[in-house]
Image (cartoon, rainbow, N blue to C red):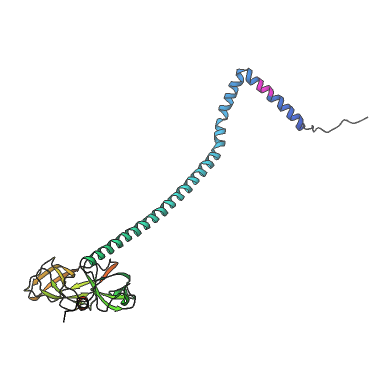
Amino acid sequence: MAEPSLNFVHQRIRPASKLVLFSLLAAVLMMLDNRYAPIHQAKSHIATALYPLQWLANKPWAAVQNGMGYLKNQHALNSQNQQLQADNARLQIQLQQQTAQIQALGGLAAVEKLQQAALPQALVAKIISTGKNPLTDKVIIDQGSRQGVRLGDPVTDAHGLVGQISSVQPFSAEVTLLTNSQTVVPAMVSRTGVRTLIYGRAGGVDLRYFPADASLQAQDLLVTSGLDSIYPAGIPIATVQEAQAGNGSPYYRVQLSPAAQSGSARFLLVVPQQNTVTAQAASDSPSAAP
């Protein structure tokens, strides 16, 4: 006689059977949902009860989305800020370049105007270097002996005397500035005609031996006297800022401000020496009849 089986493990439902079972269950629930109001109420209560769980379940994803949006916005803002800074720097450089060009054109126009009005024989030159040692009060210009520049020629800008040619090459020349300590220029007070000497010094000029019994006051203009064979008369040299007489000294204590703006000038005038101008004028005049 056969013994009863002791296998209590039930066989699992096959996947196909599961599909059929759940499909029938879904169809029944759909029919009940469309026809019975209590089903709607039950769904509402279940949805209300499950809302906190849905809210909590959505929070991590919302936080991830917000974080990604924040990082994306920060990256966009940083990129935009860098672009704006680059554009601002570029515009600043362009503005500075245009300002420098305008100033250069203004300086060139002023020098050319002075040349045409008062010094038609002068030569316009451009400063191309401050020399090997910027502390020696010398600059290099782009005109030389090929253009007619001679050793000793005076040099001015649109405002006054700058210095004197101290070295000449074929296509360039060295200018020793008025502020050089070795410079001495014959001068006179434009208001009174009293003659004197102007001495160069580092950063400025001095009037050392102006007699206390002569008239000198602030804002007096000192110009070249024209007594030597180098500097034409009437070129502005300096303006008196302060003049004090007395205190037992036979001379004024004077503070001067140079008329030329050699520190900012880019274009200069090389003025022929007086003896050169005189010789040229004599050679250009018609010879007398015998």
Q: Residue at x 46, y 50 (%)?
A: 79
Outermost right residue: 1
Closer to us: 159 or 212:
159
Q: Quadrant of the C terminus?
A: bottom left
Q: Residue at x 66, y 20 (%)?
A: 31
Taking the magenta stretch, the answer to whether it contains residue 30 is yes
Q: Residue at x 27, y 62 (%)?
A: 109
Q: Residue at x 44, y 49 (%)?
A: 80
Quadrant of the image occupied by residue 247: bottom left
Q: Is residue 48 left or right of residue 270?
A: right
Q: Is residue 145 left or right of residue 67?
A: left
In the image, which residues are magenta?
27-31
Closer to us: 202 or 276:
276
Taking the magenta stretch, the answer to whether it contains residue 60 is no
Work out whether 270 lies above or below 82: below
The image shows residue 81 at horizontal and vertical percentages of: 43, 50
The image shows residue 225 at horizontal and vertical percentages of: 15, 74
Closer to us: 177 or 67:
177
The image shows residue 3 at horizontal and vertical percentages of: 89, 31
Q: Is residue 212 left or right of residue 94?
A: left
